[in-house]
Amino acid sequence: MITKGIKGEKPTIGENTFVAENATLTGDVTIGKNCSIWYGAVLRGDVGAIRIGDNSNVQDGAVLHGTLGVSETVLGEYVSIGHNAVVHGARIGNDVLIGMGAVVMDNAVVPDGTVVAAGAVILANSVLEPGIYAGVPAKKVKEGSEKITKMAHDNAAGYLEYKEWHK
């Protein structure tokens, strides 16, 4: 993995967390326990903190960043950030799936038990309700439910196994 301290802040990584050899972690990044940061992911905590809760994953090519003086990035527990997704200064709850290639912009709030579909764009300052969101800009296409929460949770739980194959 590539790590770099920025302005005296260095990434910290929780126990039993897998970070791929070519993932990049810079600055104020804190990763919880049992997480996985996959190949080519970039977590750039130079202008705002990045906090990742336990049992979460940031998949291949995804980017987490923020905007100086505006936003930091916070992920809850059992969160999956899909391949090539961008989370830019947003707050993501627990049991959330951000689909492949999706974009979540500054100060957006994605609550517990929510799925953002592949390719969707959540605009800056959006405050979502639980459910499934799709489109550009994203709109709610399905109300939240225990089934959606379980689907998002189970996706993240699967990565707890996958990361063991790569250690």
Image: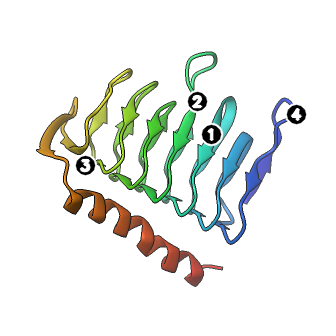
Query: How far apart are the two marked residues, 4 and 1, measured between alpha carbons?
Result: 15 Å
Callout 3–callout 1 Cβ contact below 8 Å: no
| Residue highlighted by disc 2 | 72
The reply, left or right, for residue 81 in relation to residue 121 is right
* Circle 2 crowding by C-alpha within 10 Å: few under 14, some 14–19, many from 20: many
* Residue 117: image tag: 3
Q: Amino acid at mark 3?
A: Ala
Residues at marks 3 and 1, CA–CA distance in whole angstroms: 22 Å
**In the picture provided, is 73 more to the left or to the right than 10?**
left
Q: Nearer the viewer, mark 2 or mark 3?
A: 2
Q: Position of residue 85 (x, y in %)?
A: 41, 46
Q: Circle 1 sits in a helix, a strand or a loop, which is it?
A: strand
How far apart are labels 2 and 1 at the CA level? Answer: 6 Å
x and y, in percent, of residue 128 in the image: 28, 32
Q: Tell me the residue at 29%/64% (across/down).
A: 150
Q: Quadrant of the N terminus?
A: bottom right
Is residue 96 or residue 117 the one in the foreground? 96
Secondary structure, mark 2, is loop
Q: Give the crowd class for mark 4: few <14, some 14-19, many >=20 residues within 10 Å.
A: few
N-terminal label among 4 and 2: 4
Pick whichever, 33 or 1, lies toward us: 33
| Dot placed on the residue nearer the N-terminal end, 2 or 3 | 2
Q: Which mark is residue 8?
A: 4
Residue type, label 4:
Gly
